[in-house]
Image (cartoon, helix red, strand yellow):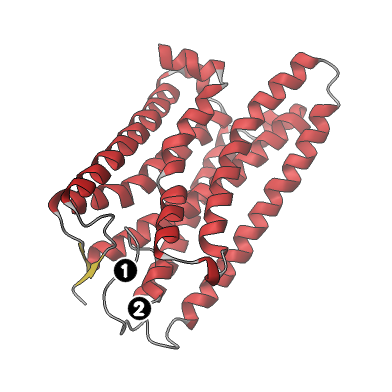
Amino acid sequence: LNEFLLLGFADTRELQLLHFLIFLGIYLAALLGNGLIITAIACDHRLHTPMYFFLLNLSLLDLGSISTTVPKSMANSLWDTRAISYAGCAAQVFLFVFSLTGEFSLLTVMAYDRFIAICRPLHYGTLMGSRACVKMAAAVWASGFLYAVLHTANTFSISLCQGNVVEQFFCEIPQILKLSCSDAYLREVGVSVVTTCLVFGCFIFIVVSYVQIFTAVLRIPSEQGRHKAFSMCLPHLAVVSLFVSTAMFAYLKPPSLSSPALDLVVAVLYSVVPPAVNPLIYSMRNKELKEALKK
């Protein structure tokens, strides 16, 4: 195969241009929001804390995620084409898996950071020192890279004998596997099972952390203290909920619910919407970040 054909959003020229403009608006919003957060955290020394350091990394991964899928889809609609090269498709799979894996790993680390800040405040400076934060961030990026290499190598070493039409607006692994020969996808299924177990482990860690966090917050005697603790945790919890719910529905929904239109909507929900919405969620109730952005 020299190229794949991606799913087009529409057949008529007017709807193609409408899709281009909608995706352009979402993409510019994601660039602006995440770019402002990165700039504010990098330039304001008061935000040089573990929480904002991890938020900066999250914004970088969000930019990587949305930049992997949306620009190519926009270009295809603008130029009225569906083609993507074989190398371009492999690059999309690698970068998308890298961004998603890194983002979920980072959300797990951020849950640990909130747990230490609220449940072990006296040990926060020791456990979340600058060296420890850099090591955690490096582990996040390394895990994303390793998983991306593993999935990309497995996916593109499989024999594809069902044509070259990918029923999605970007190169998504489940859609590529539908093009494989009958038994050739078993290796990728094995890798996916291992990934699911690790993702489930991270999810359980986040849930257990938040159970302990909310237990500790409810014991705080002052209402102002409880409000401050909740304002630290709720944005992260909202981002985790958005990420996990959309991704789980995309990959774990029963085959009976699957249809090209639904798969397309779900893919937009988990790959395009979170990177654009995350900056808004984090800045909505964060006074320090708002002040830094105003500066």
Q: Amino acid at mark 2?
A: Leu
The image position of residue 13, as x and y in percent, is 16, 50
Q: Are marks 2 and 1 in contact (CB under 8 Å)?
A: yes
The image position of residue 34, as x and y in percent, is 40, 32
Residue 269 is at least partly visible in this image:
yes
- Mark 1 surroundings: few (<14), some (14-19) or many (≥20) residues within 10 A: many
Report the residue at 40% width, 29% height from top: 38
Q: Amino acid at mark 1?
A: Val
Reply above or below: 239 against 269.
Answer: above
Residue at numbered disc 2: 179
**Lateral position of residue 71 relative to residue 123, left or right:** left
Rendered-image quadrant of the N terminus: bottom left
- Mark 2 surroundings: few (<14), some (14-19) or many (≥20) residues within 10 A: some
Report the residue at 47% width, 52% height from top: 100
**Lateral position of residue 61 relative to residue 249, left or right:** left
Q: Earlier in the sequence, mark 2 or mark 1?
A: 1
Report the residue at 19% width, 53% height from top: 12
- Quadrant of the rendered image containing residue 163: bottom left
**Lateral position of residue 221 relative to residue 247, left or right:** right
**Lateral position of residue 70 relative to residue 282, left or right:** left
Q: Nearer the viewer, residue 43 or 37?
A: 37
* Number of residue marks: 2
How far apart in space, not on screen, are marks 2 and 1 (Cα)?
8 Å
Rendered-image quadrant of the C terminus: top left
Q: Which mark is residue 166?
A: 1
